[in-house]
Amino acid sequence: MILRDAAPSDVADLLAIHNEAVRDTTAIWDETETDLAERSAWLEGRLSAGFPVLVVEIEGAVVGYASYGPWRPKTGYRHTVEDSLYVRSSHQGRGLASILLDALIARAREAGLHRMVAMIESTNTLSVGLHERRGFRTAGVLTQVGSKFGRWLDLTVMQLDLDR
Ligand SMILES: CC(C)(COP(=O)(O)OP(=O)(O)OC[C@H]1O[C@@H](n2cnc3c(N)ncnc32)[C@H](O)[C@@H]1OP(=O)(O)O)[C@@H](O)C(=O)NCCC(=O)NCCS
């Protein structure tokens, strides 16, 4: 297992991971799969802004990634970031998300950021627990603010105080 920063050549693997989450999960509140051009622009945007995109590679393929980016666009929010974390279903349950999130938090602390926010669909107890064990606490739950697969989705809003 190799943990490293993403390179532009990883974009096809990142696209596959993203689209699997769109198709099969309520982690991404989108019903439409995206394409290589959109994911390339996303990756380029993150890297050029100096935000980390960390990947785990196994046997030559990227099977998971973690990143953070601006939580909200206005400049007053610049000390706060929002994380994202995905592992291919074929490689879940092996500790890869834990490794990725630990490394992502370390990067945010090195960058001198103040808060990390996680927005998690409320039935995703695995992700909520993963974040809680790293010090995130639930700030609140927004009920029925989304919908997918014919049901309402609640959003658990969590935050980590990075400079503690
Ligand atoms: C959520 C997700 C990232 C977890 O990835 P993963 O690589 O399978 O997770 P890990 O194997 O690292 O396990 C994470 C933690 O949950 C625990 N865990 C894993 N499977 C578990 C299970 N079946 N029951 C209880 N705990 C479990 C692990 O022990 C680990 O604990 P730790 O926090 O003490 O380290 C992955 O399931 C995923 O990509 N899901 C779809 C997208 C998604 O939900 N992303 C998160 C959006 S906020």
Image (cartoon, rainbow, N blue to C red):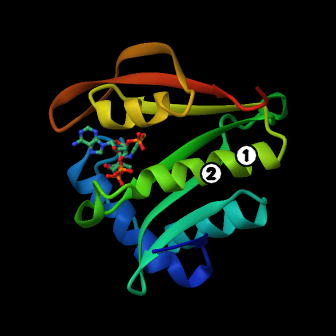
Outermost left residue: 150
* Alpha carbon distance from label 1 to label 2: 6 Å
Q: Amino acid at mark 2?
A: Leu
Ligand 1 - quadrant of the structure image: top left
Residue 10 in the image: x percent, y percent? 51, 79
Q: Residues within 10 Å of mark 1 (few under 14, many from 20)?
A: many
Nearer to me, 136 or 149: 136
Disc 1 vs disc 2: Cβ atoms closer than 8 Å?
A: yes
Q: Which residue is mark 1?
A: 108
Q: Residue at x 52, y 55 (%)?
A: 100
Residue 152 in the image: x percent, y percent? 24, 24
Q: Residue at x 79, y 38 (%)?
A: 113
Q: Residue at x 31, y 54 (%)?
A: 21
From the viewer's perspective, is residue 15 above or below residue 124?
below
Residue 164 in the image: x percent, y percent? 76, 26
Circle 2 SS class? helix
Q: Which residue is mark 2?
A: 104
Nearer to me, 40 or 109: 109
Nearer to me, 124 or 97: 97
Circle 1 SS class? helix
Residue 4 in the image: x percent, y percent? 60, 72
From the viewer's perspective, is residue 130 above or below residue 152?
below
